[in-house]
Amino acid sequence: MQQADWQENNPSLTDEAQQLVTVAAQLLQAEQRKWALRVNLLGKEWQLSLRAVAVGFCLALGMVIVGSVIWITLNLSIGAALLNAGLAWWSIGLGIMLINAAILLGLWNLMRRVISQIGFSRSWASLTGGEAS
C-alpha cells in the first residue's frame, strides 16, 4: 500500500521529463517571438531613420537655397546703395568680392577645424594600446 501511495503522489520520471520538454519548448517559442518582435522593431526604426534623414536633407537643401537668395539679395542691395552713393561700379564689385572671399575663407577654416574632430582616435588608441594622434 505504501508503494501505491508513493507512485500516486510522485509522478514518474518520464512525466517530469515530458513536462520539462514542454516548458522548454514554450520558453523557446517565447524567445523566438521576442526576437521576431525585436527584428521587426529594428526594421521599423531603420525605415523611420531613413525617412528622417531624407526629410532632413530636403530641409537643409531648402535652407541653402533660401540662404543663397538672401545672401545674393543682400550683396545686390549693398552694391546698389554704394553705387547710388557715387562709388565706381568696379570698386563696389571688387569690395563685395573681397568681403565674400574673406567670409568664405573663414567658413572654410571653421569647417576644417570641425571635421578634424571627427574620429575615434582616443578610443582606437585605448583599444590597440597605441597613442592617440
Image: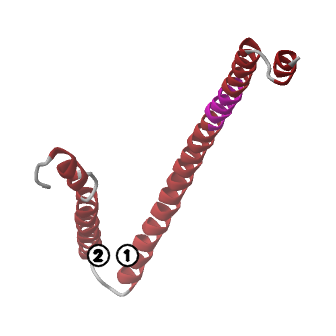
Q: Amino acid at mark 2?
A: Ile
Quadrant into which the C terminus falls: bottom left
Q: Residue at x 25, y 75 (%)?
A: 95
Residue at the far front in the pictured view: 1
Q: Is residue 100 above or below residue 26?
A: below
Q: Nearer the viewer, residue 40 or 34?
A: 34
Tell whether position 36 is magenta.
yes
Q: Secondary structure at mark 1?
A: helix
Q: CA distance from mark 1 to mark 2?
A: 6 Å
Q: CB under 8 Å between callouts 1 and 2?
A: yes
Residue highlighted by disc 2: 92
Residue at the far top in the pictured view: 14
Q: Is residue 30 above or below residue 82?
A: above
Residue highlighted by disc 1: 79
- Please state the extent of the stretch shown in magenta in the rendering: 29-41
Task: Where is residue 54? Give x, y as percent.
Answer: 56, 44
Task: Where is residue 19? Give x, y as percent.
Answer: 75, 20
Mark 2 residue crowding within 10 angstroms, few (<14) / some (14–19) / many (20+): some
Q: Is residue 131 above or below residue 69?
A: above
* In the displayed structure image, the side of residue 122 where residue 29 appears, left or right: right
* In the displayed structure image, the side of residue 122 where residue 8 appears, left or right: right
Q: Residue at x 80, y 22 (%)?
A: 10
Q: Amino acid at mark 1?
A: Gly
